[in-house]
Image (cartoon, helix red, strand yellow):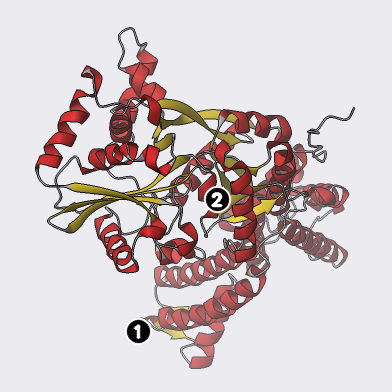
Amino acid sequence: MQPLVQPLVRPKRRPWIPRVAGLVCYLIGLLDIIYALFPAFRKTGPIKSESAQKVSHFVPGLEINNPYGVAASLILGVLLVLLAHGLRRRKHRAWMGAVVLLVLTIIGHLVAFAGHFIPRATGNGVILQAVLLALLIVYRNEFYALSDPRSRWRAIWAFFCLLIIDVGLGLLIVSLRPSEIIVGGSLGGRLEQVWLGLVGVSGPMVFQADRYGDYVYFSLLGLSLLTLLVTLYLFMRPAIPDALLTPAQETEVRELLAKHGKRDSLGYFALRRDKAVLFSPSGKACVAYRVVAGVMLASGDPVGDPEAWPGAIKAFCDRADKYAWIPAVMGCSELSGEIWCREAGMDALELGDEAVVEVADFTLDGRAMRNVRQMVNKIERKGYVCETRRLREIPETEIVAIRRLANDGRSTETERGFSMALGRFGDPSDGDCVVVTARKDGKIRAVLNFVPWGKDGLSLDLMRRDRTADPGLNELMIVAALREADRLGVCRISLNFAVFRSALERGERIGAGPVLRRWRGLLVFLSRWFQIESLYRFNVKFRPIWEPRFVVFRQTRDLPRIALAALEAEAFLVLPSLLQRGGRNAADADLSAAPLEG
């Protein structure tokens, strides 16, 4: 009998090919740059020393000493260095660019040799380039990753715009000190100086001070290199899909959640509309993700039938390979982590724990709950009253007021949240969400929003309060939600996620080792900027069941990039607007969740 879940068959890859190709390309480019910048490496006459002759076989143009050769070597070197990273990432455009540059370099050497333009030149002067070219051609199928198709025209547009700017700035640079100009001060001479300077060649202008002439030369060369850098980056940068959950996809995801939503408390957050989704071939499972800084970041478990998870995981990994994205999963459960590791050949690391409160076991009685009980009683005596309702029961005018409170109460300009945040509030399609409001003197002072976790569970999405409200409102509203759980048909509630919870807990126990104590000390230090210890302290008040969550990754060296991408996705790391690509789409236009301090 054929097993229900078949392991994924991943295409055989040769990881050493892109690494070696990138390293050799970088080496050739670096040698070109060294040749251009350091005259000691260049010879005008026959090379006599045996060691120098050996080096000349590998360094392109070593025996040329004219400005055009120097400029060409510098530009080619910079381009090859930039292309080296793309080759390591298996970028097809980087492969095409490297092949073209290597072919042009080899042809140039052969033409120069045939015309005797290079003294004592030999056909061996391009050995390293020929080896790399052969490697790229023989293993061309290893360089399959696509770049953003829109970047091609953006790169061309940016190149011409920057070229116009370069000419304008170049004219300004050569005209700053008219008294320094001896020869070539006409407009035509200045334009010629700028055009030649942008390709690394000295122009017809002569200046009184050599220092000022060097300043002009390197300024123009710097402008051209910056233009090449920006253009090549735009041409090769990874594709960023439009992170948009279409209405048809949202309907399909909701159908999957209706059947299998009970499996994962984070499942409903797959409906966040700045995420994209990939379905299994059967349509019985899907993975929600967003691409951030070249990292394809999924969150939570796949939605749907676990027997169909391998198909969705395969679609996810194939998409990541197609565009050379780094695949990663944030906050998946232990079962999901095992399937990701088994089916996709990935590895997992415990990230933290999710706090889940069982309604049947919760009580305010007993010594362990004394602090929460006293806090709740104190807030109630001050006149705060809580109301727990389904979102569809709340009038539109009140929804507008709650949304305004949530926006005014956030602690940062940018909305935070990705893996445990819905990114909106008050949408009619989210009528099953449970909203807890706290009022005083008839005014809403705080709000909690829970999204459905199957048919009998809730998962915390939004926690906001008026900045002038009394401390303890969050505890009061969570207790109010637990008190009303039976009426709502809810038997379990998921609270906040505590990052590295086990390290914080074990590190303060007696007998903890020095490594664990130092690790806990670092987490406490980082809590000054991130809510690490504070969320753990807040969650532990309610004596929850701790459910471990994991980060899944392909290679250990990818972890720093995955961490930065996760921080950017959660909006803990906000890039300047000029460096952002696209935007946060629906999440920016609406409301995302950010757990606040208790």
Q: Residues within 10 Å of mark 1 (few under 14, many from 20)?
A: few
The residue that label 1 is drawn on is: 179
The reply, left or right, for residue 106 in relation to residue 283 is right
Q: Please tell me which residue is depicted at 43% across the width and 84% down the height of the picture.
A: 182
Give the spatial CA distance, label 2 vs label 1.
Answer: 67 Å
Query: Is 511 situated above or below 374?
Result: above
The reply, left or right, for residue 142 in relation to residue 566 is right
The residue that label 2 is drawn on is: 270
Kindly identify the amino acid type of the residue bearing the numbered disc 2: Ala
Query: Is 155 situated above or below 535?
Result: below
Q: Position of residue 3 (x, y in %)?
A: 83, 29
Say which element carries label 2. Answer: helix
The reply, left or right, for residue 260 in relation to residue 345 is left
Kindly identify the amino acid type of the residue bearing the numbered disc 1: Ser
Question: Mark 2 vs mark 1: which is more N-terminal?
Answer: 1
Say which element carries label 1. Answer: helix
Badge count: 2
- Please identify the residue farthest to the top as the structure is shown: 511
The reply, left or right, for residue 429 in relation to residue 9 is left
Q: Position of residue 467 (x, y in %)?
A: 18, 53
Q: Residues within 10 Å of mark 2 (few under 14, many from 20)?
A: many
Q: Nearer the viewer, mark 2 or mark 1?
A: 2
- Please identify the residue farthest to the right as the structure is shown: 1
Q: Position of residue 575 (x, y in %)?
A: 41, 57
Q: Quadrant of the N terminus?
A: top right
Q: Quadrant of the C terminus?
A: top left
Q: Please tell me which residue is depicted at 71% across the width and 32% down the height of the picture.
A: 345
Residue 319 numbered mark, or none: none
Is 411 in front, or is 240? 411
